Amino acid sequence: MSKAGWIRTVVLVAAVGALEIACRTGAIPATMVVAPSVMVLALVHTLQSDEIGMHLRHTLSAVAIAMSLSIVGGFIIGFILNWVPFLRRAFSPFLAAYYAIPHFAFYPLLIVIFGLGPLPLIVLATLFAMVAMILATMAGLDRVPRVLLKTARIHRLSLLQEIWRVRLPAAAPHILSGLKLAVAYSFIGVIAGEFILSTSGIGHEIAFAYDNFDNKRMYALILFVLAIVTTFNMAVFAWERRMLRRRGA
Amino acid sequence: MASVQRLAAVDAASAPNIHARLDGVTRVYPPRAGHAEVHALGPLSLDLRAGEFFSVVGPSGCGKSTLLDVLAGLAVPSAGTVEFEGKRVLGEVPDGVGVVFQEDASFPWLTVDDNVAFGLRRSGVDAAEIKRRVDFAIGFMGLRDFRRAYPSQLSGGMRQRVCIARTLVLQPRLILLDEPFGALDQQTRLLMGDELLRLWRETSATVLLITHALDEANLLSDRIGVMSARPGVFIDIVETGWPRDRDSRLAERPDFGAVTSRLWSFLRGESLRALGQGTAAAAR
């Protein structure tokens, strides 16, 4: 392991150890935080129960749909806005101000429109995630060096070849960072929505445990969400690293 | 002047050795928000002889790169005509023309091998021929040890070699170079210049080089066109008379300095004028 890796590990282990000791000695009461070891045991127990699989399925399927919609839709919209300057001029102020809006404030409205099922969650998460992908796609395409586009013309590429062989590969690093954001934002959108109001899903289960003072289960589920999101992000990160390493990035 | 040009045109019709021709070419950028119309180039005429090494020098901003873009078919002239091998060039890069730019134009997502083969893979050339030509170009440009490397792992000079090799595999009959060594250090420039001469001799292509380095133009060229400040026109065309089999040691010859001096005598006034344009524009 690298030196930086060691430092990270030591910090993490020390923090978890300190929390464990603080909880065990009663410095932090169990009504506030439970000891990490208790969290892990509770998590094992929770995962063995029947209904958790159902909640997990609901959450992950909503995340998967929102993620796909925002990545594909965001890419297409970003591409079109980059290609058509007057559309871009028309819409870029909206895009620039977009993340200043508290999206979750509109969630009750989405429930009124779409009902209390997976649909408002998917819409919320997609709205939240898609614009990151739009912005990243536009930024990537903006930054394709002009000399590469000239090179495409010298090689007499058709428009489609130019886009596929030159424009998109050149923009790929930016587009990929938008994709990473879209993945993270989809998780946030769905779980936060479930937390606010929902009848199922991991977020709902956390809120339910919270309302019932079931701290063990609540922290177990938070740990679980953390593990899922981290695993997913690490997979995307590893993929990105493999793609970018050869570019010297 | 006009009659001289007419005479040249009649000559060219019978003489097959004119490879590319600019005739009365101008390039005017239309006015845009806050900017007046810019007359960047011309009217300018030039006959490139088949197989010659022609360099263009001129003060910065005189339209050298515009000249190259127009000749390559990357830009359309506002007036006048461009011909390559007897055919009009109209907004499209003709087959047989290769271009190397000052900026790094290697594709960072492709290995050296794939960069060099890029143009060939889309031209319907069969796999064995692609391999043969790529092997040759890679060997010629001294990239054999870096075939699997990505551009980010190479120095600026090496990346420029990749771009030259990528042009070379297409076997261009006219090679246009827009300050290809502009970003390189002096020693690398000299060596790359030697390689360029070797390439020129062995491919017998016509070469047009844009450069701001007078010594470089002098060393490499059969003829050197000296451009005026914007709008750029040729104010002198110098025949160097150097032997075809030359390299950077040419600079040791006593008559070498005379050519550079002649270039500078024409260019000094124009450079001052260009500077004046710059300060006038800044003051406005």
Image: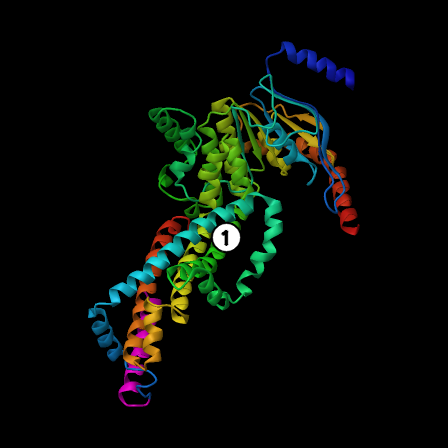
Please identify the quadrant where the N terminus of chain B is shown: top right
Specify whether residue A11 is in view. Answer: no
Q: Nearer the viewer, residue A36 or B19?
A: A36
Asked if B200 appears above or below A99 in the picture, the reply is above
Q: How is the image coloured?
A: rainbow
Identify the residue shown where x is 56% and y is 57%.
A95
Q: Chain of mark 1?
A: A
Q: Residue A246: x and y, percent?
A: 38, 48
Q: Nearer the viewer, residue B77 or A48?
A: A48
Instruction: Judge from the rendering whether residue B147 lies leftward or rightward of residue A96; answer left or right.
Output: left
Asked if B259 appears above or below B23 in the picture, the reply is below
Instruction: Judge from the rendering whether residue A231 lies leftward or rightward of residue A166; answer left or right.
Output: left
Specify whether residue A155 is in view. Answer: yes
Question: Does the magenta run of residues contain A19?
Answer: yes
Q: Amino acid at mark 1?
A: Ile
Instruction: Judge from the rendering whether residue B240 lies leftward or rightward of residue B147; answer left or right.
Output: right
Q: Around disc 1, counting alpha carbons within 10 Å, would you say few (fewer than 14), some (14 to 19), or many (20 or more)?
A: many
Q: Nearer the viewer, residue A44 or B242?
A: A44
Residue at mark 1: A134
Q: Residue A55: x and y, percent?
A: 29, 65
Q: Residue A104: x and y, percent?
A: 48, 67
Element on which disc 1 rests: helix
Identify the residue shown where x is 65% and y is 31%.
B67
Question: Does the magenta run of residues contain B141?
Answer: no
Q: Residue B214: x and y, percent?
A: 64, 36
Asked if B266 appears above or below A46 in the picture, the reply is above
Tell me where residue B78 sits by quadrant: top right
Tell me the magenta residue range.
A1-27
Q: Residue furthest bottom?
A: A26
Tell me where residue B263 sits by quadrant: top right
